[in-house]
Image (cartoon, grey):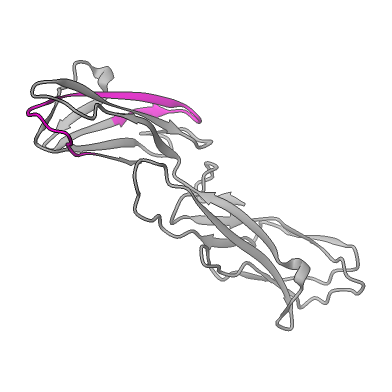
Amino acid sequence: MIDENEDGVFEPNTLIRVRDVRWTNIGALTMPATSVITFPSTPSVFSMGHKEILPACNVNQHLVVEAKEQKEFLLRLPDAAPVNGLAPHKREHTFSSTIKLLGRAFPASIVPTTLISRYPIEFSAVTVTPILGPGEISAFNFTITNISNGEYGADCLGSIVAVIWCDSNLNIHPPTSAADNYVLTQNGCLVSVPRLASKASVNISIKFTCSMAVRACELVLMCSY
């Protein structure tokens, strides 16, 4: 199985590419040349409908549907559900191969495969002071991690931008140096990560002042790439 952009992460609403499918005739008779292999849709994976007519296969013979001449099976993962809390998106998806002859499936050909869809860029270690008085200074801290096998950045697999919104009771401090990597916006700030290598992380800290005594202010964190 290969993900759509080959960074090792199966993202929501992207393609799964299944290549080089191997099968063995474990029966007692030769399998005729009109058998068909597919990867049907399931409740959590949508098949793009490709099928392959298999050649005859002798008893105990091993054959492969090679990844050439469009002979790859495409499936699409569903889009992600709305995020609940600060936990990264993770969802299991299961699909199976099926080989049929005259419309009847060979039971041993139904081989389930399970994968987890997630995003290549994840947030973690999100902390903020829960209670602040008027004029008190705090910081919104979080970590951005690239869990993929590829490098992300402006000239790589994609730019990383974290969007922070806050309500009118919180005043974000302007950046003091280029190393802060963020710019103020009307309702918060934008944090840009120039480059993030595979499996690497970067810690972000955004200082702000509370303009009045409150127990709760809204801070919304979103990442795009």
Q: Is residue 106 left or right of residue 74?
A: right
Q: Residue at x 10, y 33 (%)?
A: 169
Q: Quadrant of residue 173?
A: top left
As rendered, which of 30 and 212 lies closer to the eye?
212
In the displayed image of the protein, which residue is found farthest to the top?
Answer: 177
**Residue 95 visible in the picture:** yes
Q: Residue 32, how many percent across, how many down?
A: 83, 77
Q: Quadrant of residue 37?
A: bottom right
| 182 relative position to 72: left or right | left
Relative horizontal placement of residue 204, taking residue 112 as reference (left or right): left
Instruction: Identify which residue is drawn at 39% across, 39% down.
Output: 158
> Which residue reaches farthest bottom?
102
- Name the quadrant of the C terminus: top left
Q: Position of residue 175 (x, y in %)?
A: 19, 21
Q: Is residue 70 visible?
A: no
Instruction: Out of 155 and 199, give the one closest to the viewer.
Output: 199
- Residue 43 vs residue 78, the one in the foreground: 43
Numbered label tally:
0
Q: Residue at x 50, y 31 (%)?
A: 198
Give the image location of residue 197, x and y in percent.
Answer: 47, 28
- The magenta stretch spans residue 79: no
Residue 210 falls inside the magenta stretch:
yes
> Measured along the vertical axis of the image, is residue 33 above or below residue 184?
below
Q: Height in image: 85 above or below 21?
A: above
The correct choice, above or below, for 38 with respect to 161 in the image is below
Residue 79 x, y percent position in the rendering: 41, 58
Q: Which residues are magenta?
A: 192-219
